[in-house]
Image (cartoon, helix red, strand yellow):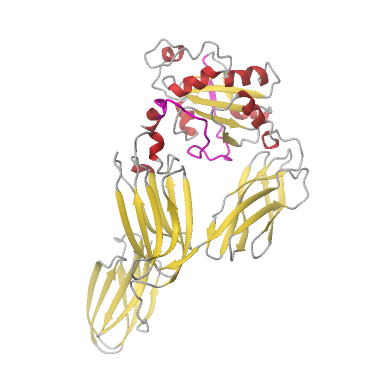
Amino acid sequence: MKKILLAMAVVFAAFTTNAQLPNGSIAPDFTGTDINGVEWNLYDLLDQGYRVVIDFSATWCGPCWSYHTSGALEGLYEEYGPDGTNEVMVFFLEGDDATTADDLAGTGGNTQGDWIEGTSYPIIDNAQDIFNLYQCGYYPTIYTVCPSRIVTETSQISTADHYAFIQQNACSPATESNDPSLVSYAGVHATCSAVDVLVNLQNFGLDNLTACTIAVTGGDNNISFNWMGNLDTYEMTEVNVGSVNISSDATLTVSITSSNDTEDNDEVMADISMAEEGTTHIHIDFKTDNWPAETDWQLLDDDGNVVESESYGNSDNTEEFSYDFWVAQGCYSFRITDEFGDGLNASYWGDYEDGYCHVYSVDEGGNIVAEIYDYDGSYWYADESAAANASQVVGISENEMAEVLNAYPNPTSDVITFNYNIKEAGNVSFEVIDMVGAKVLVQNIGSKAMGNHTTALNLDHLASGVYMVNINTGGSVSTLRVNVQ
């Protein structure tokens, strides 16, 4: 639907988002045959040092036609292509297989005009598989792929701007023997106390990269890691450099410190924010946009386990939701994703209401203690996150658990076993209560003698989350938190 809306737009300004492959990704290789029968392979061209510009368009798309007829890519190809300075290759890929050869030639019923006349660069028809391979969400999508295989959505920019982009050092072919490159930071941007520093390391050298040293500064402790492996030229891998302690908002500098042939690509930066200090009661206000099925969110604990999550079904109307969760003490992260990449910014597409997402930590009275995540639908995102330190217990309290000797495994995915002590003979029962106070399981064990006992409960039918288990033992009640995964 959004593809059609985009094609109907009157004014379509150039923009860059991470709705597609995120900038900095490795471009997938593809082979395609143009309408003249010539076969082209992306990586073969990149290995020859070409910068490759790919125009994913559709014959029916008005903005695509406007950009095509602007001559920006034609000028780029003629001046800097094989018959010019021989630095650039340009491709037109028709990404909608429902169109026909007649549409491409301007004589069909689903076209803006003749796309072939006056186009000197290769045209590859029926390229929907490649369009999908590049995770494209709309037409036109303009990518520039550098010899390093790194892809950037350069959008509908001029000939001069495209050429300026490819002249950057990062878009030059590899020329040095030993050239490890840090492409991007890949870790989290919020923490309660420490962060694992993840970076994408690429071999930008002509020789295989087998070792380099990566250092991190800017946190409470500086660290250094001696990476060892075997990367071919342009091959990339994610490296966990190590854990850095954070006690306040910080900007980490990640650098290659071992000797190499150039320092131009040896450093990346990462802004890290401290988690908001809050309570064990988390409140979420959420409003979908007109495409709710694109949006998901998760609340994760410090081990990456999903505590709560939500996905939204198909609808063309907005809907408001309110959630309350009680969690155990600890560090939590909230992550929200949008598969199209435009977030809840529905007004961009026409007369639609933007959605929103507000995540708070609240006290016993429901008053806001901390604002964990605040999004008003005014901008695009594909993936955002924030962190909270649930340090103050509110809401459901945890009783003295002297009666409970052990409960394992916890977290559990199915059966959990309780060891407990009965001080006086009597009936024993278990109650499992979710975080909104509903009893989801009650199991009566019957009469038990004084002493130690073991009982197993099967919780595999429960949704993932935190539950309170009340153990009634001969008139004494003990309470234990259980995490079901």
Up-down: is 50 above or below 253? above
Residue 193 at least partly seen: yes
In the image, is residue 347 part of the stretch drawn in magenta?
A: no
Nearer to the camera, 475 or 274: 274
Up-down: is 383 above or below 61? below
Q: Which residues are magenta?
A: 6-35
Q: Is residue 439 left or right of residue 368?
A: left
Q: Position of residue 21 (x, y in %)?
A: 51, 38
Q: Position of residue 351 (x, y in %)?
A: 34, 35
Up-down: is 358 above or below 120? below
Q: What residue appears at the point 39 percent right and 34 percent down from the top-left corner?
A: 349
Q: Position of residue 341 (x, y in %)?
A: 45, 40
The picture quadrant where one finds residue 167 is top right
Residue 239 at least partly seen: no
Q: What residue appears at the point 41 percent right and 45 percent down from the top-left corner?
A: 377
Q: What residue appears at the point 36 percent right and 32 percent down from the top-left corner?
A: 1
* Quadrant location, the C terminus: bottom left
- Type of secondary structure dominating the magenta stretch: loop
Up-down: is 333 above or below 57? below
